[in-house]
Image (cartoon, grey):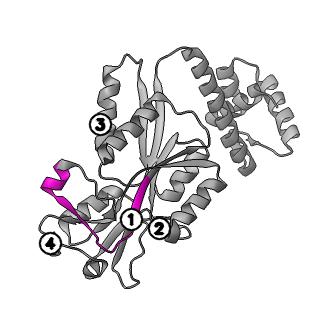
Amino acid sequence: MTFKQMEYALTIAKCASLSEAAKQLYVSQPSLSESIKKLEAELGYEIFVREHNGVTVTSEGQDFLVIAQNIIDQVGNIEKKSQEGDSKKLKCTFGTIHYYFMGEVLAKLVNELQEKDYDGYDVSIIDLGTIDIIEAVANGSCEIGVISYTDHNRSYILKELRKRGLDCTEIHSTRLNAFFRKGHPVGDGRLTMHDLEPYPYVSVWQDQKTQYFFNEEGIFLPANTRKIFVNDSGIIDKLLETTDAFAVGCGVIPAGVSSETTYAVEISDAPISSTCWIRRGGQELSPVAKRFIEIMKEKLS
């Protein structure tokens, strides 16, 4: 199998015609047909069904074309990076659980990058669940991840990190807080877990098989608690602003949000929550990742 044969197959599928594909590839139709026949013989199945008015892709052929396209895309990425040479463009991806303050961290980072002499940058913060962040860092999709745990789930999370060869560094610890809308009937005085029972609890949905020990709050509420799970952290913000629902977190929220719509109250009998960042074991961080961590520490201090 050759790279050229994969390109031939993809072009035929796009054109749905051997003759039209031959024109676009600047090869003769017999030569193109023979090349595909050799490829199919090597694979042990047909990629295309030849018909009088063109060709159609078989089910096996569809699977092959997906793989072929991925290979070609990866080769293209390698060639692009090689052509960039000494380009000063920065690329970094961070995975974090839902934190109110993360937008301010990214804003400060972007403002600093804007002042530097870079050709450009691709910086991403992806809002994920705890187990998804661990997976993304382990497979290299994210350079670093930001997660949290409490005494309730600390051992389970650390065990998972060790299993995947990831390093974990704590940067902040605080007792868990509850978030409410301004004017919420719970008030802003001393708060206990019992005080939360009458109100709906809203959180980011995670896969049911991992939700118990890897929920991002690290807190386990009574079974009769009214629970709302959503797959968009922006919906949480809306629910907090317009209903009596509450969320749980480390208590750090942007000053503007706190003063206008939402406030946080420490839960006096809740566990201590530790915020930490993770990376693949021994991996050297990029300058932008190091600065990202520094800004987080500043925000959490």
Q: Nearer the viewer, residue 96 or 219?
A: 219
The residue wearing badge 4 is 187
User: In the picture shown, does residue 108 fall above or below 28?
Assistant: below
* Contact? badges 1 and 2 (CB < 8 Å): yes
Residue 240 quadrant: bottom left
Residue 106 — which label?
none
C-alpha distance separating marks 4 and 1: 22 Å
What residue appears at the point 19 percent right and 62 percent down from the top-left corner?
241
The residue wearing badge 2 is 151
Residue 272 — which label?
1
Kindly state the secondary structure of the residue where label 2 is placed: loop
- Say which label, 4 or 3, has the lower sequence index: 3
Amino acid type for the residue under numbered disc 4: Gly
Residue 15 as seen in the image, left or right of residue 248 = right
- Say which label, 4 or 1, has the lower sequence index: 4
> Is residue 285 something one can see in this rendering?
yes
Eye-nearest disc, 1 or 3: 1
Query: Which span of residues is magenta-colored?
Result: 256-275
Kindly state the secondary structure of the residue where label 4 is placed: loop
Amino acid type for the residue under numbered disc 3: Ala
Amino acid type for the residue under numbered disc 2: Asp
Eye-nearest disc, 2 or 3: 2
* Contact? badges 4 and 1 (CB < 8 Å): no
Q: Nearer the viewer, residue 48 or 221?
A: 221
**Crowd class of label 1 (few under 14; some 14 to 19; many from 20; radius 10 Å):** many
Kindly state the secondary structure of the residue where label 1 is placed: strand
